[in-house]
Image (cartoon, rainbow, N blue to C red):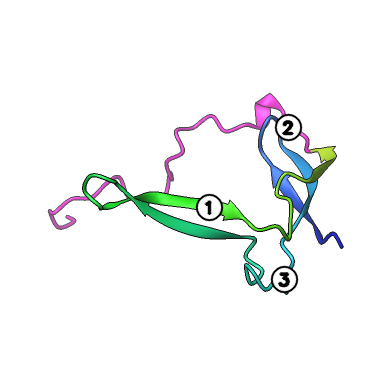
Amino acid sequence: MIRLRIQVIHWPRRALVMTDTPRPDCRDCDGEGGFEHDYGDYDTGEYAGTDWEPCGCWNESRRWFLMPLPRRPRWLRRRDSGRDPWGPGGYSNEPPF
């Protein structure tokens, strides 16, 4: 049985897609959808990263395109630097006047 959810994707264009989710009562992964495996460097034995192996209870590549999301018109897009105009100008150790 497929367990569907709606998700927003951002590449190649913002759109809504329907995706499959892991089976919540799966005995192998406990509903998480996969397993994490830490691995280390063979020379030093220190932590080098984490691999993720998907569980067989779901297919993470199964998705259906629903509809594209509209883009904002060019004149409505932000033109500022992203700074808060009402926020402080920066940190200083000196007390205010």
Q: Is residue 87 visible?
A: no
Q: Residues within 10 Å of mark 3 (few under 14, many from 20)?
A: few
> Closer to the camera, 91 or 42?
42
Q: Is residue 76 above or below residue 40?
A: above
Q: Residue at x 66, y 32 (%)?
A: 76
The mark that comes first in sequence, 3 or 2, is: 3
What residue would you read off at disc 1?
52
What residue would you read off at disc 2?
71
Image quarter of residue 65: top right
Looking at the picture, how far across and down is residue 72, in whole percent? Answer: 71, 33
Q: Is residue 30 above or below residue 50?
A: below
Q: Residue at x 50, y 59 (%)?
A: 36
Which one is in front in this view, the residue at disc 3 or the one at disc 1? Answer: 1
Residue 24 marker = 3
Looking at the picture, how far across and down is residue 79, in whole percent? Answer: 53, 29
Q: Is residue 82 magenta?
A: yes
Left or right: 8, with 95 as reference point: right
Amino acid type at image mark 1:
Trp
The answer to whether mark 3 and mark 1 are in CB contact below 8 A is no
The residue stretch that appears in magenta: 69-97
> Closer to the camera, 11 or 96?
11
- Mark 1 residue element: strand
